[in-house]
Structure formats: C-alpha cells, structure tokens
Image (tube, grey):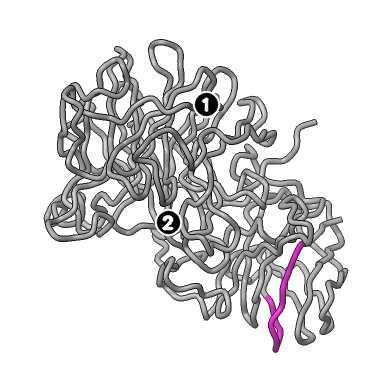
C-alpha cells in the first residue's frame, strides 16, 4: 500500500530549496541547493544532495546521497555556498550538472554516468578561446531541445555599479552550447527583462529576478523564473528558445498572493525557485517555502497545476497534500508543520529576509534538534503560536473521524478552535487545554460531514504555545 504524499514532499528534517524536477527513466529526481535548520549559516551552505522517487509513487522518496560536495576540483569553487543547480542528460547518455558558486561568476559543469551522481567537475562554461562571459552566471537552467541543441539560461545583468544580486537588473541571458555541453556556440542573448527593462512592458511588476528553468511544452518554449516580487514563479512563452518571449502569468506564489485574487499572504514568505514536470497526465510546479522565521531556511514543496487546452497554466494553490493525487486521509496523525497556511496579526505583508530573523515575534515552523544530533529524531512543530494564530491544512477526505487529539505545550490555558473553512465559520471542534511546560495531549469531539474540506486551527490563548501534531480518529 502506498504511503500518503505530503507537502513538503521530503522529510521535515530535510531542507532542499530551489528544486529542479527531472525525470530520468522511471524515476523523478530533484536537484536543489541545501539549507540547514535554523538558517544560521545563510543560504545554500550544504553539499548538493539528490532525492528521487518512482514516478509510480511520489510518496516514496529515497535519499541518493551527496551528488557534488562543496570542496571540488574546480579552482573557482572556493568559498561561499552552492546555489540552485540544474541537471540534464547529454547525447552521450551522461548526466551534466550545471551550477554557479556564490563567490564565483563562472557556471561550472560536472558530469556523472548516473543521474544521482556523484558528479565530477568537467569544465566551466566558456567561449572557444577559454574566456568566460563577463557576468555572474547565476541559477543556470538548461534545455536540451528535440533536435539535440543545448540552451543555457543564467541570471540577469546588473545595472552599472550595482551588486550582482540587486533586483535592479536589466536582462537574464541565454546561450547555445556546443555538444560538449560547456563551450559557448552563440550568445549571450538578452532574454527576459529585469525590473528596470520591464517598465512599460507586459513584464512590468514581474520583471525577471532569478531562477531560470526552461521547458519545451507542445512545441513552444516556457521559461519559468522568479520575478522581482520574489515570492512567485512566473512564465513567458515563445516559439523560439532564446528570443520572442511574451509574458503569460504566475505559476505559484509561496504566499498564495494572486491566487483567485488574494492579496493577503497566507503564510510567512520569501524568495522561491522551482520548475515544471509532467507525470502521467498531471503537471506539477515545484517551489519552496520558508521556515524558522527567516528566509534562508527553506523546504521543497510541489503542487498540481492545470495546463489548459490553450497552453496556459493556471496559478496553483499551496496545499498540504501536494503530490498526493488527491486529499489526505481524514483519519490518522499529522505533524503541524504540514500546514500550508499560517497567519497571525504579527505576520504582516512584508517578506522574510536573511537579515532579520523574526522567530521571537511571529509564529513559525521550527525544528528542535535531537540531543544526539540525528536529524531524523528532531522534533518539528509550529512554534511561538499566539492568540488568534491560525494554521490551515488543505485538503482532507472527511466524514469518518469523530475524535480529535492535539499534542501541544502552552504558557497559559486556552482552547484550539477547529474549522472546515478558511473563514472560520464552519466549526468542527473546540478543545480546551491547560498550561504546561511539557508536551500534553488533549482529546475532544470532532464533527465533519462526508466530503473534501480543509482544516483550519485557530489558537485562543493568553500565552504563547507550541503545537506539534493532531490526530483524527
């Protein structure tokens, strides 16, 4: 019997943002950067690792090990983190990993005989004379076209005098590569406008920021990217791989901003990065979310997305069931960190940043390390819950459960109200709890009609609380 697939799709102790989904053979592989719980070491401090799952069971994820370490044979790989990579298969059957070290301008290429690696450094992307493009080749994304031609997309060009990461960029760049996978055949070509170049165009307010992820769908070229808004993944479409892109819309926002007109963040949010993949007849968009009250502690998520008959994607909704193929079972135990919505008066419209950690102020997803350092034994819970804090889980197949249990600890007595809608107008349970420094379990009646519905839990408490899990029975 298959397990349920949840969102995030990897174990709660794993932090793989910037997920680029690729299907090789009968498995789905995810290539991403590697954050650590807490975010104290900033963005992308870990080795590249690969996780994979059979396309027949998107709940059965396997850790494939370190695919490419921070310490490599590339002389330009000294220092700083390993941001978002991409991986494609070459005409020789081997697998090519593209990356840009945070402290370097070059786009490195590593190669392996297996999609999971380990990868060995091959070369930097360069012109035939060995020189490098005079720009930072950030967040490389690669497309191997149907005719075997290879296209590379990298981060935008900054305005003169601006730091390379400044959002005030002009364009991202595209290149065609030779069959050796690293020599530039043509380019650079200015592809998508950054926020300065996007003014008075169809890209305005959604100018390119980072995170190029190309795909060819129905004979046309789709280029997923993170816009100047930071929290959303957008896409344009073109009939040619490097030119002629027209802006279409948003694929997903990691705050659900824009989904069905919503303008209120449904959860603390920050940057995002991801890509599209089709499994069977269903498209999915991969992205990431923030945890620990800081922007640089991120977990990979994925949700189904609709591609209509006109080739237009409709913005996906953040859910807790993600890759499950339907709602979660309305019986069983669930960790509170599978909440896809988390709101409170202390959580404003401002995005999280790496510069200011707000975990002392706002509710957040938190990992409490195990005494022996084993990440699989860490505790995961919603921390710093305050009066009026609301956590939402979408979606469940309800109608069988008659009891609800909660595991939490609180500085004062209070109640947890449970609703079957985001507006908190359809009550399903109300469980009182006492003040306790230790984890306690409380149980009460639960009532919900047969059908698919979300669950929203709203805390009523004069003190702060931590909430670990709930169980329906």
Predominant secondary structure, magenta span: strand
Q: Is residue 229 left or right of residue 265?
A: left
Tell me the SS state at disc 1. loop
Label 1 crowd (10 A; few <14 / some 14-19 / many >=20): few
Q: Is residue 468 magenta?
A: yes
Q: Is residue 239 visible?
A: no
Q: Nearer the viewer, residue 472 or 178?
A: 178
How many numbered callouts? Answer: 2
Q: Which residue is mark 2?
A: 260
The answer to whether 196 appears left or right of 354 in the picture is left
Q: Where 227 falls versus 214 (above or below)?
A: below
Disc 2, SS: helix
Instruction: Give residue 149's position: percent from left, percent from top.
Output: 27, 17
- Residue 130 at least partly seen: yes
**x and y percent of residue 364 in the render?**
59, 68
Q: CA distance from mark 2 to mark 1?
A: 24 Å
Q: Which residues are magenta?
A: 459-469
Q: Residue at x 20, y 44 (%)?
A: 135
Q: Residues within 10 Å of mark 2 (few under 14, many from 20)?
A: few
* Residue 364 inside the magenta-drawn segment: no
Of the numbered discs 2 and 1, the one sitting upstream in the chain is 2
| Residue beneath disc 1 | 281
**Above or below 132: residue 162:** below
Towards the viewer: 263 or 345: 345
Image quarter (top left, top right, bottom left or bottom right) of the C terminus? bottom right
**Left or right, residue 88 beside residue 436:** left
The quarter of the image holding the N terminus is top right
In this view, the mark in front (2 or 1): 1
Q: Nearer the viewer, residue 111 or 400?
A: 111
């Amino acid at each position: 019997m298959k397990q349920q697939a949840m969102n995030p799709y990897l174990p709660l102790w794993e932090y793989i943002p910037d997920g680029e989904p690729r299907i090789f053979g009968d498995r789905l592989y995810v290539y991403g950067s590697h954050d650590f719980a807490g975010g104290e070491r900033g963005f992308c401090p870990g080795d590249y690792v690969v996780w994979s799952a059979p396309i027949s069971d998107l709940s059965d994820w396997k850790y494939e090990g370190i695919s490419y370490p921070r310490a490599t044979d590339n002389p330009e790989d000294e220092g700083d983190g390993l941001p978002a990579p991409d991986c494609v298969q070459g005409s020789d059957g081997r697998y090519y990993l593209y990356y840009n070290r945070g402290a370097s301008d070059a786009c490195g290429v590593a190669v392996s005989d297996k999609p999971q690696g380990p990868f060995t450094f091959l070369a930097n992307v360069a012109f035939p004379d060995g020189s490098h493009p005079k720009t930072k080749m950030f967040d490389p994304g690669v497309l191997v076209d149907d005719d075997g031609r290879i296209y590379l997309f990298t981060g935008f060009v900054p305005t003169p005098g601006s730091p390379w990461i400044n959002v005030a960029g002009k364009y991202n760049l595209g290149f065609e590569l030779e069959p050796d996978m690293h020599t530039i055949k043509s380019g650079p070509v200015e592809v998508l406008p950054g926020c300065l170049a996007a003014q008075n165009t169809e890209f305005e307010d959604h100018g390119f920021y980072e995170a190029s992820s190309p795909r060819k769908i129905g004979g046309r070229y789709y280029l997923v990217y993170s816009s100047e808004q930071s929290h959303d993944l957008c896409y344009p479409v073109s009939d040619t791989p490097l030119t002629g892109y027209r802006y279409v819309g948003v694929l997903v926002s990691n705050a659900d901003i824009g989904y069905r007109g919503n303008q209120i963040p449904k959860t603390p949010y920050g940057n995002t990065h991801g890509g599209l993949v089709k499994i069977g007849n269903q498209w999915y968009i991969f992205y990431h979310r923030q945890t620990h009250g800081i922007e640089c502690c991120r977990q990979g998520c994925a949700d189904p997305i609709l591609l209509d008959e006109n080739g237009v994607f409709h913005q996906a909704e953040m859910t807790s069931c993600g890759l499950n193929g339907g709602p979660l079972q309305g019986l069983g135990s669930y960790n509170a960190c599978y909440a896809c919505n988390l709101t409170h008066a202390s959580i404003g419209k401002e995005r999280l940043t790496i510069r200011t950690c707000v975990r002392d102020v706002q509710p957040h997803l938190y990992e409490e390390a195990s005494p022996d350092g084993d990440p699989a034994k860490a505790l995961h819970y919603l921390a710093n819950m305050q009066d009026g804090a609301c956590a939402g889980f979408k979606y469940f197949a309800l109608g069988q459960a008659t009891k609800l249990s909660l595991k939490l600890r609180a500085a004062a007595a209070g109640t947890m109200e449970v609703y079957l809608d985001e507006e908190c107008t359809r009550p399903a349970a109300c469980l009182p709890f006492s003040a306790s420094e230790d984890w306690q379990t409380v149980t009460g009646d639960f009532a919900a009609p047969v059908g698919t519905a979300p669950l929203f839990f709203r805390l009523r408490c004069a003190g702060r609380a931590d909430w670990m899990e709930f169980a329906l029975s």
